[in-house]
Image (tube, helix red, strand yellow):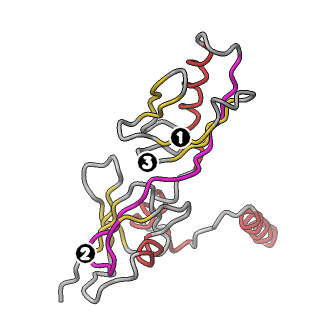
Amino acid sequence: MRARSALGLVMGASLICLGLRVPPAAANTSQNVAVVERQAPAMKGYRLGVGDKLRIIVFNEPNLTGEFSVNANGTISFPLIGDVPAVLQTKDDVAATITRRLADGYLRTPQVSIDVIGFRPFYILGEVNKPGEYPYEPGLTVMDAVAAAQGFTYRADKKYVFIKQEHQAAEVRDPLQARVPVHPGDTLRIGERFF
């Protein structure tokens, strides 16, 4: 029994040292599971969207290296090869496409790497003091978004937030909790409370 308790403490401490949060046992309700699934997106699987800014590096090719934005048509205009599809692609997908096209008659063995250096904005509407468009920062939560919009109005319903992700057809109602993440391109709506 003591060995199991000690093992649990060591594993919990290890997860904390790695920067992982261990949710309390009481947080395992079906409502909170949905919130955990909406955790901030891992950058490795991040899907690009219109307005994202990228730094594209082509090794030993300074004329092809630079900063690029995803255009309104969902592509990146890249020298020599033209428009490269980017919306809903990962940065690795885009790097592979650029590498393949450059290798097709332009460079012998191109090496391409991509970093996301700027994210598309998020939007907050409804019962906040300054609704509008705001710049996205990694790790942004709903409460951070409300703070950026200068807080709630006196009519705000502080129990729920309505979130519509960029490529969803409808908004989803989530409990208004500090840990609910915001993704680039999300539209948040704070509803009006009814007495």
The number of callouts visible is: 3
Q: Nearer the viewer, mark 2 or mark 3?
A: 3
Q: Which mark is residue 134?
A: none
Mark 1 or mark 2, which is nearer the start of the sequence? Answer: 1
Q: Which sits in the foreground, 132 or 176?
A: 132
Q: Nearer the viewer, mark 1 or mark 3?
A: 1
Image quadrant of residue 109? top right
Q: Position of residue 64 (x, y in %)?
A: 63, 29
Q: Secondary structure at mark 1?
A: strand
Q: Which mark is residue 51?
A: 3
Q: Give left or right: position of 71 versus 189.
A: right
Q: Position of residue 175 (x, y in %)?
A: 36, 72
The amino acid marked with disc number 1 is Phe
Which quarter of the image is occupied by the C terminus?
Answer: bottom left
Start-end of magenta stretch: 109-132
Mark 3 or mark 2, which is nearer the start of the sequence? Answer: 3
The amino acid marked with disc number 3 is Gly
Within 10 Å of disc 1 (Cα), the crowding (few <14, some 14-19, many 20+) is: some
Q: Give the residue pinned by disc 2.
A: 191
Q: Position of residue 99 (x, y in %)?
A: 61, 23
Q: Give the residue pinned by disc 1.
A: 68
- In the rendered view, would you say 152 is above or below 162? below
- In the rendered view, would you say 91 is above or below 33? above
The amino acid marked with disc number 2 is Gly
Please check the rendered image and state whether residue 186 is part of the magenta-colored stretch, yes or no: no
Mark 3 or mark 1, which is nearer the start of the sequence? Answer: 3
Please check the rendered image and state whether residue 112 is part of the magenta-colored stretch, yes or no: yes
